[in-house]
Image (cartoon, rainbow, N blue to C red):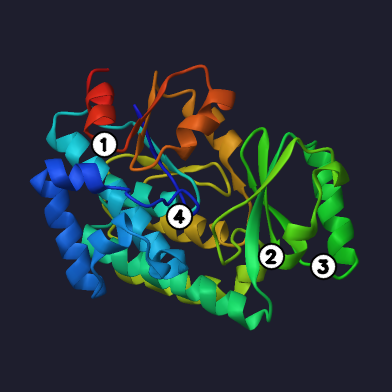
Amino acid sequence: MVALFGGQGSQHIGMGQDLCHNFSLAKQMCEKASDQLHTDMAKLLWSENPLLSQSAYTQSAIFLVSMMAYAIYQQEGGKSPQLALGHSLGEISANGASGALDLEHGLKLVFERGRLMEEVCVKLGQEMGMLAVLGADIALLEAFCLQAREGGQVLYAANFNGGQVVLAGAKAYLQSLESKSFGAKKLVLLPMNVVSHCPLLEPMVAPFKALLEQHLKDSYSFGVVSNATTQVYRDKAGALECLGVQLTQPVRYSDCVSVCEKEDSFYVEFGTSVLKNLNKRLSSKPTYSITDTTTLKEALSV
């Protein structure tokens, strides 16, 4: 089994609620996170809350629910992964599942990751965002980004997800784009107030690697696939290198899935369901997503 973990943009109201209502372990994890972050995480996750749009809290929420789902799956007798693959923020969750981060240190790490991203983006002087582009020719899209930058705009291809590419840039410019500009089928503005996986985040690489050095343990039960390089790392040294590079280099999710295809017969996504949909275009192997008790039973039955 390959374990999958979603990233920022996969958050939604109600995430983790069913798990907390049905498993004491999930409830305890949610309460522990609330104490640590001095925030009612149940309220944050299950009702309209402006904090959920702030990257530090968004990333904390997604990490928490991902770890809840993974912990319950293991508690209920789920299979041990051979590999883990996380999308963007999810790569940190993958490190947590493998044993390199406990809940406390993982929450500290992702909260500061989100805070640093917001800090960098505020200094850019304009509101930033991410735009999903569906069905465009990749070469044409990359050429469009280059031309935009040469013209003074802020625009980078940040995620390569098979038939979907996510652009990072100034939100006003992203909102002005039209699908016909690069032959896309559809454009979707993601619920994010930061950019990621592009050179704009270079100022946070050094402080973030210092946080990784502080919080990561050199204890891995299975390998983690790097978003940026597609290499598999199994120790702290590999994580420090790959998670630092990940901030400024695109997520190559489709290439990462190709690496995982050599390993096993199915995927399980923990806490989110975005990657299950991406995998429909990228793999002939089944992908299960655990977001509640019903989907947990489905994954456990495999």
Q: Assess disc 4: are there few (<14), some (14-19) or many (≥20) residues with their C-alpha within 10 Å of its C-alpha.
A: many
Q: x, y (%) of residue 148?
A: 86, 60
Q: Which residue is mark 1?
A: 292
Q: Nearer the viewer, residue 218 or 182?
A: 182
Which residue shows up at 60% across the image and 80% down it? Answer: 122
- Say which of marks 3 and 4 sits in front: 3
Q: Is residue 86 above or below residue 217?
A: above
Q: Which mark is residue 171?
A: 2
Q: Nearer the viewer, mark 4 or mark 2?
A: 2
Mark 4 or mark 2, which has the lower sequence index? Answer: 4
Q: For residue 223, which numbered disc appears in the image?
A: none
**Amino acid type assigned to the residue bearing label 2 in the image:** Lys
Q: Which residue is mark 3?
A: 153
Q: Earlier in the sequence, mark 2 or mark 1?
A: 2
Specify the amino acid type for callout 1.
Asp
Q: CA distance from mark 4 to mark 1?
A: 21 Å
Check disc 4 and report the residue beneath it.
89
